[in-house]
Image (tube, rainbow, N blue to C red):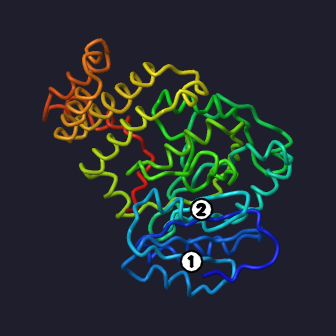
Amino acid sequence: MSLQSGPEPLFSIAIPLFNHEAFVGATVASVLAQDEGSFEILVSDNASTDGSVDAVTRLADPRITVARNPVNVGFAPNLDRAVALGSAPRVILVSSDDLMGPGALSTYRRVIDALGTQAAERAVLTSPLALIDEHGVPIAVEEQHAPIASLGAVDEVLSRAAGAPVRRVPAAALLASAMRSMRNPLPFASTCYPRALWEQTGGYLGTRIQNPDKWFHWRLLGIASEVVYVDAPLFQYRVHRLNREKARTNAQSMKHLMDEYVTMLEASDSLLESAGMTRQELRAAFLREDVAKRSMAFAATGQGLTARRYLRMGASVIGSERWRDSWWWRARAVVALGPLAPAILGKRAGASISASPFHSDL
């Protein structure tokens, strides 16, 4: 139920929620504390079994809308349910354990105004994340989520508006970089996009278990004009036991690989054209980045069983073309070391596994 009234807000702050009673109150409070007041908060609870909803409703602010799913619909469908609760022209998805930093919305508002209406309609805004622990204590600032510095130039007008360096990156260039590395080009919490583009892409969809945000971001960049990167940590990603444990389990790793395989299959011709890639190049990227490099990283960190499963999965879906790929042979050699791999290679070899956390709040 919502008590929202008054003029149409600029920002929809969508918060997918599941069993985060300990954190979600602080998440919503960090939005309510913004000095830019043109927002609505949309909380879609995915059948939580703890006091998560009560932690939100206790705040009793008319800008908050809370909807409760009768059953757990899965992570990706709940993202779309959260976004669909509102109508504001700009959308930001914030996890229910993360925080919006002071001045985040006012900074984005100034950048949007400086862009002008026409440019802003197809522009995606984002920024790096500050990492905090479960108690909210700062840990570090995440490095740039993609090679933005090499792809875009600093815009002096937007930088003055933001009060921080701002780079403008062609969306197609960032998409090409992401698809060739099989990575998520944009952070989850700090990315702000036009609602019209969410509608045009069809949303997050329900076909990815681990990385619906990555699949959405690829399709988003396929139709956006540019990414505007504000080089200041405007949002805070909370690192705690539950999200780290989810990312490390063998089952989660195999779900991730299945997601990557489906992404490779479902990339449309128009998306490949936007990135300037052929389908064969995308298959090679999947074999290199998601099968070979990850299997080597798992082997180097003592996760030999997962490493072997990655190779078997790669063999089953790529077929005979793997024998012509040098990365496949490297991976086979590393995995063949078995329990000797960590001692020979060292744990630092595991750094090729993405440092970005999986989003699997099922």
Residue 83: which numbered mark, if any?
A: 2
| Residue indicated by mark 1 | 66
Q: Which mark is residue 284?
A: none
Q: 122 or 285, which lies in front?
A: 122
Residue 352 spot, x, y in % from top left: 38, 34
| Between 57 and 318, the one nearer to me in the picture | 318
Q: Secondary structure at mark 1?
A: strand
Residue at the (34%, 26%) spot, across then down: 287
Q: Is residue 26 left or right of residue 51?
A: right
Name the residue located 64 percent from the left edge and 46 percent from the top edge: 200
Q: Earlier in the sequence, mark 2 or mark 1?
A: 1
Q: Which image quadrant for residue 225? A: top right
Compared with 78, 21 (above or below) is below
Q: Is residue 9 left or right of residue 60?
A: right
The amino acid sitting under disc 2 is Val
> Crowding at label 2, few (<14), some or many (≥20) Cα neighbours within 10 Å?
many
Tally the numbered discs: 2
